[in-house]
Image (spheres, coloured by chain):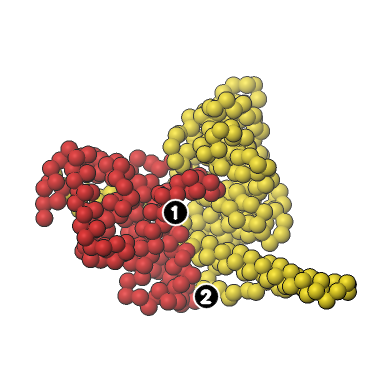
Chain colours: A yellow, B red
Amino acid sequence: MSDLRERFQELADVAARQGRPPGPQAALRRMRRRRRQRATWTAALLAMVLLAVTVGVDRLAGPAPLAPTATTTASTTPPDVSITPDPGKVERPAGSPPGRAGEQMVRDVATAVAECRGGPPDPPTVLVAWGRGHDQTWLVAAAPPHPGEKGLCWANGLFQASGAGGYGKEGGPGTALKPLRASGSQNLRSGGRYWGQIIGHVTKRATRVQVLFRGGIAPLELTPIQSGDRFPVNFYVGFYRQPKKDRNLEWFVTRVIAYDSAGNKVAECQATAGPGHSC
Amino acid sequence: MARSESFEEFCIGAVGRLIGQLFPVTGDLNEAEEVVQEAFTRAAARWSRLRDYDVPEAWVRRVAMNLAADRARNLRRQARAMLKLRPPPEVLPASVEALALAEALRSLPIRQRQVLVLHYLADLPVGEVARTLEIPEGTVKSLLARGRHALAAKLGEPEEVLDPS
């Protein structure tokens, strides 16, 4: 009978092997993003204080017209590390979210694809699709697989307008591609409500993806996003409204079914319960 | 450049070990990855200072342990935060005994889990465990005893078998 030390060690070894840590680049990226946000907030706060002081002084001084609003520029903190992740080139057949935040979103998902491929992919990552829904911007990026590869490296991201959010890599060059796959988020707050998201890939034979829920949520009918000839699957994205009483954030998806144009079922997956739900 | 490279080297060298140590505390591999990642993010921001530490990994482990405890205590708040879901954790390919230990650990209070992991897995003496968690040594001993007792009961094995020392 093994003692506690041996059993702990075995658990730790298995967890270390199975773990998918995002790596040092992700830590550095997260740190830099926080610094930028902190600098922006500081600048905004400073501007508000200056404005308040200006207004207050002017009121004390009498009815003279207000002085021009004080402005300030965001202070920039030089990063203490100079290395940057290299996501490589990104093709954007569908354009991309605008602005610096949009650019960062693209870079984030492209970096996740590059991590999946073990470096900047060749041919380059493709930003397959992006869109907005419920105050979120979602993106799907993927690297065209090399001939003979059975898997696919792709990534999806979900961001707020500021660029804050999450993204993750999916699949892998050596992981057999399933005809239907789904994952998502369940706690997006928008318009005073909570929303869930489902995102995944589906076989090219499918023309319709039906998502079934529990909790009385009506089924969702989604049309796959055409990814083009270079990819073996298409993608799909959808949002659903969480039941009010369940804002404690469960993923209510129970089953996802793909149909072809004749209405035949071509793929199906059963959602798993518990943390890290997927299908 | 050298600074970032050394942070990268440090990160790559320690991340597997730390995830292995945090997994029995969180009971969830994704959660363990998240707290370790967050701890490394904080380490990156302080790397110019941390790199001179004898064991920077101890600092990261301490932060990760605190984060794991905070997240366990504030589940509601944590749930409100936007979480990006990943595929479900696979059933770990471990022995029946190790899986039973993981299951038994999930039912223990977070403090007991931390103490057990730091002592039995990170191999820290009681005094070092106390310093890491910033609690008195007597409390560590008490938590260790209670943790061993609870594990023995849940695993249906005598304490002497689990800890022959």
Rendered position, A82 above or below A195: below
Furthest residue in direction top, as rendered: A263
Q: Which chain's residue wears label 1?
A: B
- The residue at 70%/70% (across/down) is A49
Q: Amino acid at mark 2?
A: Asp
The residue marked by circle 2 belongs to what chain?
A
User: Marks 1 and 2, how far apart in space?
Assistant: 23 Å
| Position above or below: B125 against B94 | below
> Label 2: how many residues lie within 10 Å, few (<14), some (14-19) or many (20+)?
some
User: x, y (%) of residue A24?
Assistant: 46, 63
Q: Secondary structure at mark 2?
A: loop
What residue is disc 1 on? Answer: B34
Q: Nearer the viewer, residue B53 or A177?
A: B53
Q: Is residue A188 left or right of residue A64?
A: left
A93, B106: nearer the viewer: B106
Task: Give the image location of residue B82, x and y in percent.
Answer: 55, 48
Say which mark, if any, is on residue A142: none
Q: Is residue A84 above or below residue A224?
A: below
Left or right: residue A96 versus residue A25 is right
Q: Is residue A18 visible?
A: no
Q: Position of residue B25 (x, y in %)?
A: 33, 51
Q: Could you tell me the amino acid type at mark 1? A: Glu
Report the residue marked by disc 2.
Answer: A80
Q: Nearer the viewer, residue A2 or A180?
A: A2
Name the residue at 40% across, 69% down.
B9
- Locate the N terminus of chain A and report the quarter of the image it occupies: top left
